Image (cartoon, rainbow, N blue to C red):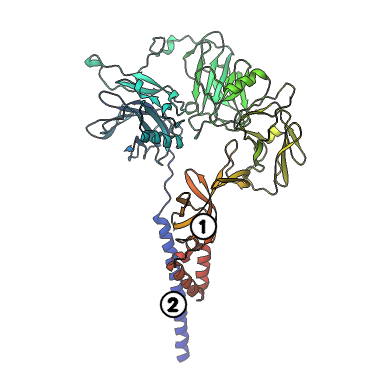
Amino acid sequence: MKILLIINSMRITVITYITTSLLFLYGILAQRAFANDATPDPEIIQFPYILITEVGFKNSEQDTIVLQVVDDMNDGQGSKIKGLSLKDDSVFFKLDEDIYIKSGEKILISLKNDTQEILTVEDELKINLTKSGLTGTTEQLILLDGNNEVIDAVCWASSTPTATEIKELDDLFLKKGWDSKEITSCIDSDKIGTNQTVWRKNLIDTNSKEDWEIKIIEEPTTEEETGTITASDDITTADGTDGNMDEEEIDLEICADEIIISEFLPNPEGKDSGQEWIEIMNSSGAECSLYGWAIDDQEGGSKIYQIESTDLIPTGGYLLLPSWKTKLNLNNSEDSIRIFNQNNKLTDEVIYKSSPENKSYALNKNTGDFLWTSQLSPLMENIFDTEEAETDEDDDDNESSTSKKTTSTKKSTSKITNGTLSDYVYITEILPNPEGQDKGLEWIEIFNDSEDSVKLGNWKIETSSKTYIFENIIIEKQSYIVLSDADLGFSIKNSDETFTLKDFNDNEISSVQYEKVSEAKSFMEATNIEGENSTKYWTWTDKPTPGEKNYVTYTYTGEIENFDPIKSTLRILSEEENMDIQVLITGDELLDSIFTQGTKIKVKIKLENEKFILEEYEILEESKVENQKKDSNNLLYIIISSLPPIGFLGYSAVKKFGLIKIV
């Protein structure tokens, strides 16, 4: 009997010990889970593409704003715009309701109302605000999405802006809401009279005053004529007509095949969706309609777009087709644009290999060639950068490029002539092993770091077994050329390769060597800046930047003020700059026991999406201030680790999950 009691007692003790251990570990995990749930990641809202299309900031009665949904990002089915907000000096309106809106719909906003309300009038969303009005001298109107990112903006300025107003425009420029930080780049408000509004010429947004013109609001003359005047009112055309014609009044001419692609923008600055466009020109001798014609990109690409407009295009006139309307998504790499007449016959096709950001591919009527140009000219005669135009006159058949990437698909038919010599043309980035299939997606980037254009005729790129010879290509100052494996005529090896750039005299200008590579990572020449010194170094990155500036890191030495393990934010005090750094380093390090207040640290960081991201760190001197949390954690660590079986569980939990800081 005594032996049985002892055995039962031991069994109860073991069960109690195991149960207590499991409950203790469960409590730790639950506490950690609660800490994570307490700070959920912010919701990422997919927002429709909306533009400011009209602003009246000098109206005698009520200032007005008109917005238009260019693309609801949901194939016309409608998207939620909760969180949409408007800002001048500060946010004066934010939409808190779950309202859905579709492509093409408008939002009419009026100020100086007795009450604030949101209502629908004839299928249009109308918002009445009590705000007294918009500043009529110097101001900016900014449209923000639900993630507080700039969707669109417009600014106007008088001849006497304040320092604060100039600084506000500088901030808007940094957020890519306007194309210049110069206050003179805004709409001249001194030229806007009472009851005149500024309104958008079309839905192609270049973030500049070139998008806008003045519209006069006619004063109502009779009681019957009174009513709300919006951007949907008829606009009188330059020839005096009302711009509205019945379909039966139009004699649909059978257009000849001289309907051509004259210009297109495949890679707008920033977000591409809804901002790409294609311009078609009537180069025939008679006006005609393109009703029944169609346009698409390369075979197997986007769904073909059927033109339904019956408007007559005069000889030499244009038709602009924005992507929010056509749903044609142009690739930033190799793609083509094709036009088919009403009999489904292919009448024109333009092929391009890769596209620089915010440059259009435009037809030079003098040479018949397409050139990349930063002078966007929708619905106008094409305009080219001066140096490009001069180059075309000198070398009609030359393949020239001032873009960030290689562009032309046409091979030179003229004899390759020696280019110019330069010590400032470098290999700056290589992608040997793209994700998935490599063919056609590998590339090498060349950069001209000088202040002069360089002709690359008979320059060459050599590998261990292959050679590429440049034709009569020009690389402009501070510009890039990106050559794909298709351009080179050979594939790029995934291991043990050397690329050497030589001029036409066979002098080695730049050389890059790599060994084993990882998929979807490019080998990049980055820059590190420490104080007044900058150094170049090569590194692998999972964020390639073809045709764009390679990333820059900064090295600072300072003292840790605090580390927030929940937000993963490290704050350091440095002689150069005090900063909050986002910590993305992962592993089994217990960072909160390392990043203690008063610790001297050296950090290498990079700027990404306006945030400092920690790349590397080195502890120079540990804090002299006693860290009670660290000591207690170490003591508890020893206690837990010495108690089986919870010691083993505790050690594993600490090692894998970093639970020691919760304990």
Query: Which of the pair 247/335 is nearer the observer?
Result: 335
* Mark 2 neighbour class, 10 Å CA radius: few under 14, some 14 to 19, many 20 or more: few
Q: Nearer the viewer, mark 1 or mark 2?
A: 1
Q: Which residue is mark 1?
A: 601
Q: Which residue is mark 2?
A: 16
Name of the residue lying farthest toward the bottom: 2
**Looking at the image, which residue is at 26% across and 16% down?**
220
Q: Is residue 226 above or below residue 175?
A: above
Question: Where's residue 332, x and y in %?
Answer: 58, 32
Question: Where's residue 125, x and y in %?
Answer: 33, 30
Where, quadrant-wise, is the N terminus in this rendering? bottom left
Where, quadrant-wise, is the C terminus in this rendering? bottom left
Question: Where's residue 294, x and y in %?
Answer: 54, 21
**Looking at the image, which residue is at 48% across and 73% down?**
640
* Left or right, residue 640 beside residue 508: left
Mark closest to the chain's N terminus, 1 or 2:
2
- Secondary structure under tag 1 reads strand
Q: Is residue 387 visible?
A: yes
Image quadrant of residue 132? top left
